[in-house]
Image (spheres, coloured by chain):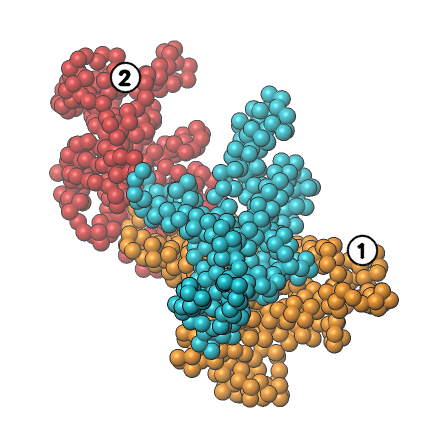
Chain colours: A red, B orange, C cyan
Amino acid sequence: MNLLKVQDLWVKYRTRRGVIEALSGVNLSMEEGEVLGVVGESGSGKSTLGFAIIRLLPKSTEVKGSVILNGIDLFSLPEEEIRRMRGKEVSMVFQDPYSSLNPVMKIGDHFAELMMEHGAASSRGEAIEAAGKLLERLGVPRERLNDYPHQLSGGQRQRVAIGLALILKPKLVVADEITTALDALVERQIIDLVKEVKRDYKTSMLFITHNMGLVAEVADRVAVLYAGKLAEVGDMREVVSNPLHPYTEALLRSVPRIGGSKAVKPIPGEPPDMRNPPPGCRFHPRCPLATEKCKLEEPPLVEKGGRLVACHLRG
Amino acid sequence: MGLKEHVLYRLALTPLMLLVLLTLVFVLMRVLPGDPITMLEGKNIPEEVLARRRAELGLDKPLHEQYLNYLYSVFVRLDLGVTALERVPVGYFIAARLPATVDLTIAATVVALGIGVLMGILSARYEESWFPQFARVYSSVVYSIPVFYLGLMLQVGVARPYGLPTTGRLNPLNMVLLDSLPVKTGFVLLDSLLNGRLDIAADYITHIILPALTLGVYISGVFTRVTYLSVSEAMVQDYTRAARARGIGEWRVVTRYGFRNALIPLLTMAGLQVAALLGGAVLTETTFNWEGLGLLVYEGILKRDYAIVQGTVTIYALIVAVVSLVVDVAYALVDPRVRY
Amino acid sequence: MRLPSGFAEWGLALGTALVAAFALLALIGESLMGQRAVSNIIVADGKTYVVPPLLPPGSKLEVSGREYVFIMGTDQLGRDVFARVVSGARFVLTVAFLSTAISAVLGTILGLLSGYIGGFLDRFLSLVMDSMYAFPGLILAIAVAALLGVGVLNISLAIAIVYIPSYFRMVRGVVLSLKSAPFVEAAVVAGASPWSIVTRHVLPNVIPQIITLLPVSFADAIITEAGLTFLGLGIEPPTPDWGFDLNKGRQFFLAGYWWIGAFPGLTIILSVLGFLLVGESLNELLNPRKVES
């Protein structure tokens, strides 16, 4: 059985200026122990996917479809049930380490609160003990448990956030752009940490990012998202060496390599306005290979050589 | 710097603020047009009398000398001058009236915080319901009602039907008794309890209910709004979302993540509201004949007694400086980012 | 044109209606009813007729064939309460307008200077303004009004002094944040004079903020004015004024003649509410709060 199965997920935000279709019929599956990368530009819906899984979308959002974790349909559960699962069965690490920790709570309190809420520790002392051990393994001295978030560096705060996401040994960790807000050196450290965690804990992870280069390092499989629809899904190495969808190609071309000889080519055009997505294939305005059919008909997600791709020409 | 250093730093800054305020008072009193003597004794007094009076009050000396004298008398001699007519030291009146205003202000703050914070938190917790709208209407209406009108309404609508007293601090008999009590601090409640006179204490409480309600409700509007805004602001922050993502219960999220972070702007607002409270106290005391500093100011105006007005304004400056210090220290206790 | 939707838009509509009504009263009220507000004598057909005091609301009086209705009754001196309420608008709103204008202009100028020049001037002015801001406004106004005496200008000045720090702080804040903004730096590098930087870059960013503060400032001024006149400052009888009338009506309240004080009080509430609604709704519409994204 798959660990995670996302079936026909539609997410629409209702705003003052119209209805934004963030995700339009997304289908995904994940196995236990694997890291699935989700790549896309801003507005592609990748963060929405993460929030949908953990059911933290704003109340004014329209959600259709189902998310099945270990055979349980998360969308059918009452609020109390899903709350119990958050942090314990599925957890999340956020993008901005400078704002995702409570400024008036000590680091240790964050852990104690979490563990005692879910019954993983019966006293604060117990929780601190366990938290200290985990933090040391993540590269944060355990004295930090006595500090407030603002006393830690960005990298340390993100390690703490990762620690909070791991300490209850969840089945799935959603990592939403966890290095985007960090500078290059610290980003490198965190990515290395993620690789260590993957190796030592064998945690299943949904790694969301806009950076194709990063995801290639960490993920086993990758799903490329464009304008709320999947463009391509497949094994990481295969996709990198032989991209099928024109968008995937363009993404790979836009990754700068130090000392590389290939010129970096940005993708022409801009992501579409999601209140009014383009007809047919949503990528067609920016696709160098677009045909008349691409402008009119939406390409279905079909299987090709062990991969899934949504393109009239390549699929 | 830690808490101790922070407090010391603020303690050092307070005299500076006090100096500024007292200078302000002085500038107002001396530099603005309007002669205190003619205000008191009319425009038709003979020249020699005018000159003599001015010399008595020290108004004939050069301005900078007057300024230094003023600062000296306040800081060193703790002397606020004497009243124009009876030549009684102003400090005497102030010492007699200050406790009443302190009591009223504290009671009103309790009422205001109680109502305001409660409504604010409920509004943030049940944001989808009708409650926030109701709270907003409440705070706007309460802000628009002049505090003396509210007092009047309470006097007519509540006091009469329910037999509550409408003026003064105690009924006349107890006022006399109060003076003859052996142990005296100046605070009616303390005095009556220390002397074992629970009946006087009870009487005081029935007298303070309406003024405290009036002033408290008047200020509660601001607290409601600020609590609601700060709490709901904190509720949309990343750290709140992250807490929910960890499965933390909603009430704990509202209190530990929402309210606890909202305390910071709330405290700032509370500090500013003390000024509004003191101002409102003047009107409340006038309405209820509550013998505090506010009523003293009013009487001073009526009698055109310049010394009283200046003296009480000076005291207000002192109170503000002290409150400012207290708020700042509380600030350091509430926000760890200030301390470390 | 569409119907208002949502709390903020309804608030703005209602507030503007109230403000407009009071502005109208302020402009024409006194000329219409000024006479009946200050005198209890009606002259008709060459005969003088004295209006009895303490008439309840709705009383009608017949004077040489014409019927006079006192919808809000008469006060203790026989003057028409409705007339006093209507003509009082002129005094109150003039004071509110003047004091708001003075404090806005002075506060803005000082804020601009302090923020732009910085250094010792800034530190000094900030300390003074912060201290003033912390001081109880009403008491400051009382002190100034007690010294200046009666009159529209005097009482306006007294109130203006209280609100200068609010404008100062806001403008200074905007100036400080703009000083480090890239487009301002670019202008400085390009050699623009301080004057043009202020007028072309700073002011356009400051003015919207000031505009959102103005209505609330107006409301505060009305409340402060009512407080001052309630205490007997700044005004001389028989000038009609709401706060003053409320005080006079106090003693009569408990005796059962509620209309003398109640109607002026109600008017204060409505006028303040009007400006408050405009200010708050404007603020909410122009600066929407952050929504969960």
Helix, strand or loop at label 1? It is: helix
| Residue at x 57% of width, y 27% of height | C185
Kindly identify which chain the residue marked by label 2 belongs to. Answer: A
* Label 2 – label 1 distance at C-alpha: 78 Å
The x, y position of residue A258, in whole percent, is: 41, 17
Provide residue A133's location: percent of width, then percent of height: 38, 48
The 10 Å Cα crowd at callout 2, few under 14, some 14 to 19, many 20 or more, is some
Give above or below for C179 relative to C18.
Answer: above
Circle 1 residue: B63
Q: Residue at x 15, y 47 (%)?
A: A76
Q: Classify the position of the N terminus of chain A by image quarter.
A: top left
- The reply to whether label 2 and label 1 mark residues of one chain is no
Labelled pair 2, 1 in contact (Cβ < 8 Å): no
- Can residue B209 be seen in the rendering of this structure? no
| Badge 1 amino acid | Leu
Residue A308 location (% of width, % of height) = 16, 24
Quick check: C164 left or right of A303? right
List x then y, in percent, for residue A164: 34, 46
Res. A57 in view: yes
Residue at 37% across, 46% down:
C13
Q: Which residue is mark 2?
A: A286
- Quarter holding the C terminus of chain A is top left
Determine which quarter of the picture holds residue C193.
Answer: top right
In terms of image quadrants, where is residue A296?
top left
Observer-side mark, 2 or 1, equals 1
**Drawn side of residue B290 relative to residue A11, left or right:** right
Side (left or right) of B221 relative to C4: right
Q: What residue is drawn where x is 34% and y is 55%? A: B132
In the rendered picture of this protein, how many numbered marks are placed on residues? 2
Q: Helix or strand or loop: what does disc 2 sit on?
A: helix
Alpha-carbon neighbours of circle 1 within 10 Å: few (<14), some, or many (≥20)? some
Considering only vertical position in the picture, is A92 above or below C236? Answer: above
